[in-house]
Image (spheres, grey):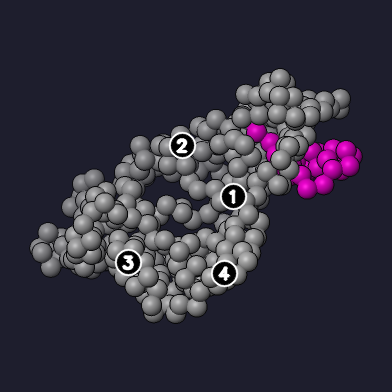
Amino acid sequence: MASNPPFQVMEDQTDEDFFDKLVDDDFGPNSSDAAQVSKFSEGSDSDEAKAFANLSIEDVNGGGEDGGVVEEEKIHGLLRQGITADKISSQLSPWAYALFEFLPIFIKKQLLLHPESDDSAQLSQIEAEKLLAHLVEVEMNKRQKEGTYKGKKFNAICHFFGYQARGSLPSKFDCDYAYVLGHICYHILAAGLNGYMATVTNLKNPVNKWRCAAAPITAMLTVNRWAQSPGAPSIGKPAIHPATVDLNGKAYGLLRQNGVRFLLDDLYRNPGPLQFDGPGADAKAVTLCVEDQDYMGRLDEHTFFAFGIGVLELTDWTNTLFFLSFRF
C-alpha cells in the first residue's frame, strides 16, 4: 500500500520526523550557533511539549516545525570509524551538537545503538513516548515555578505496545486483502518469476475494483556504500527505501486539522466486535479511505509499454495483474 509511486513500501513505524518537531521553527543551520545552543540550555523549547502542557493546563482549568534534526547517519558513520560515544558530540555540526546534547541520556544511548540495514536508527528501540513525557514534565515544572501553572504535579506513566500487543482478529478487509495477495503470488509462481512482491492498490474501493500487480524487489532497493577507513574500498549493502510519514498527505492533514479536538474531546469510534457480515462488515480505516493510492489505475497500457513493462491479463480474476519488469 503506497501513496507515492512507484512502489513505496509502507510500514507502521515511529515517525522519523519526530526529532524535526522537537525544536522551534527558527532553530536550524541558518541560525547563529550561540543562539542555537542557548535555546536548549534554557529548558524545554519543544512545540510539542508546550502544546501538551497547554492542553494539560486547559484540562485543569476546565477549558478546553520543522527545525534541526539529529544527523543519525553521520553519528553511525563516526561510530564505524572508531570514535567513542562520549566524543560524538564534538564531531557534529553546531546545531546538531546542540540538539544531541539537549536530549536525555537514555535517548542518546538509544540513538547510538547499531543502525538498521538502511543506516537509520532503530526507531522501534527509541522510547519516543518517554522523551515526550520528559519534555512535558520539564515544561510543566518550569511553569509551576513561574506561577503560570498551579495544578497537580505532572506524573506520566508510559507504555509501549509492540506489534504483538496491538494485534486483533482479522477484519473482513484483512481477509480479503490476504486472499488477493495470495492469489497474486500464485500467478507470480505460475509465470515462473521470482524476486517479485505482490501489491494491491485502490484499496478504498470495493474488492472488484482493486488493482493487482507484481513489482520487482530490485525496484525498491537502494545500495548504501561506505568505507571502513580512508582509502579502503567501499562496501555496499542493499536495503529497501525507508518510507517516512508524508507530512503533506491527506491523512496527516486530517490529523493536524482535528488534533486539538482528538486530545480534548471524547471522540472515539467503538464499532464493537469484528463483523464479517451485515452493517459494519465492510468498514475500513479512515486513513486508508482519505488517501489516493490507486497509482496503478492512473497508468494506461501505453505507459507500460513505453517503459518496457509487460501486461498480463487474467481470465479467472476480476482484476488485471501487471508484472512489472524495469530495464536498468
Magenta residues span 178-201
The answer to whether any part of residue 193 appears in the image is yes
Mark 2 packing: few (<14 Cα in 10 Å), some, or many (20+)?
some
Please name the residue shown 56% across and 44% down the image.
272
Q: Quadrant of residue 74?
A: bottom left
Residue 270, image x and y in percent?
A: 50, 43
Work out which quarter of the rendered image holds the N terminus and state it.
top right
Label 3 or label 1, whichever comes before in sequence order: 3
Q: Inspect the image, locate mark 1, and give the three-letter code of the amino acid beneath it.
A: His
Determine the residue positioned at 44% across, 74% down: 109
Q: Which amino acid type is shown beneath numbered disc 3?
A: Tyr
Judge left or right: residue 192 versus residue 108. right
The residue depicted at 76 percent of the width and 44 percent of the height is 196
> Which residue is farthest left?
147
As drawn, the label of residue 231 is 4
In which image quadrant can residue 293 be found?
A: top right
Mark number displayed over residue 97? 3
Closer to the chain start, of discs 1 and 2, is: 1
Camera-side residue of 323 and 252? 323
Secondary structure of the residue carrying tag 3 is helix
- Give residue 10's position: percent from left, percent from top: 58, 46
User: How far apart, in angstroms, are the residues tagged by discs 4 and 1?
Assistant: 28 Å
Using the image, determine if residue 195 lies above or below residue 5. Answer: below
Q: Earlier in the sequence, mark 4 or mark 2?
A: 4
Q: Nearer the viewer, mark 3 or mark 4?
A: 4
Residue 121, horizontal then vertical, whole percent: 50, 63
Q: Which residue is mark 2?
A: 249
Q: Which residue is mark 1?
A: 241
Label 4 environment density (alpha carbons within 10 Å; few <14, some 14–19, many ≥20): few
Label 2 element class? loop
